[in-house]
Image: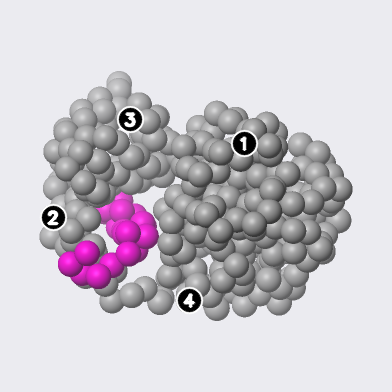
Amino acid sequence: MTKQIAEIINKHDNFLVVTHVNPDGDAIGSLLGMYAALREMGKTAVPVLGSKFPALFEFLPGKNDVLIGLDSLNFNPSYIISLDVAAENRICPQVDSLRKSATLVNIDHHPTNPGYGDINYIEPYANSTTQLVYEILYKAGHPLSLDVGKCLYTGLITDTGCFKFAGVTSKTFELAAKLLEPGVDNYEITRHLFEEFALSRLVLERLMLERIEILLEGKLVLSHLDLEDFEEIGADLSEGENLVNRLRETRGVEVGGLITKLSDNLCKASLRSKGLIDVSAIASELGGGGHRRAAGIKASMSPQKLRITLLELIGTAISLSQK
Ligand SMILES: [Mn+2]
């Protein structure tokens, strides 16, 4: 499949590059890495996000070229390259209108990805989607530049939790070495990703910790934030993105979950598991998706309802795992 996609980017032109809403480092790294490479190849390419560019990734090259929505799009893409998007409804919704005239290439590493593209390259064993981008560019014979290296390394660092998470092998470090090769500065990237948070994020974390509930005999820790909290604190929604990891750090805790209320009848939840419980299966039951150890949900229900539903589903999964 890498060969087929490598041929597309070598032989064709006019690419729209997209990723998921609430983008994380792998989403933005894949988006800007693929975009930078296409530009280096002399192609017409436009990176698109469905919402505001997250402040955390402003250090990456190409961010000023990102279109927010398609209103000012001034060319007809032949190909839409979707990166790190587990479910089609998580792409910027306007992209749907282009699907008749463009070929959708779906490149992802989420095992729950149903293969919604015209061409699908889904590799659940990849540490990050940026790894798949690297493999495609390698197959295409495109040499790795400093810009592309920075972006792809950012995705790898994000999705492996700085090489802490399960699934990291000697191959991961081989890839990391290749990505650093053009002169990428590891500390520059990790500092931007983990040591430059806005003060508002610290305040959000305090609020999240104040509200923890220790459930299921300490195996589940839940907390919640409201959109109003973000507004009051002056924090961007993306700043809440990985706070949930904190809820899993305690001994005995199998699952941490953070529910964010977006409106009375709409909320999202991020789930993190140590591995015993497959949180992507729980997320799938509620229309979300992700990985065994990290998954997300956006659900049309009140936070109270989502809390009870999660408590039931996770409670059942934990008792089944003990049989
Ligand atoms: Mn990813």
Q: Amino acid at mark 2?
A: Arg
Depth check, mark 4 against mark 1: the one in front is 1
Circle 1 residue: 99
Question: Quadrant of the image for the C terminus?
Answer: top left
**Circle nearer the N terminus (2, 4):** 4
- Proximity of marks 4 and 1: CB atoms separated by less than 8 Å: no
Circle 2 residue: 211
- Proximity of marks 2 and 4: CB atoms separated by less than 8 Å: no
Secondary structure of the residue carrying numbered label 1: loop
Q: Amino acid at mark 1?
A: Arg
Q: Is residue 77 visible?
A: yes
Circle 4 residue: 191
Query: Looking at this view, is 292 or 151 the one in front?
Result: 151
Alpha carbons under labels 1 and 2: distance apart = 43 Å
**Circle nearer the N terminus (4, 3):** 4
Look at the image and give the residue range highlighted in magenta: 231-253
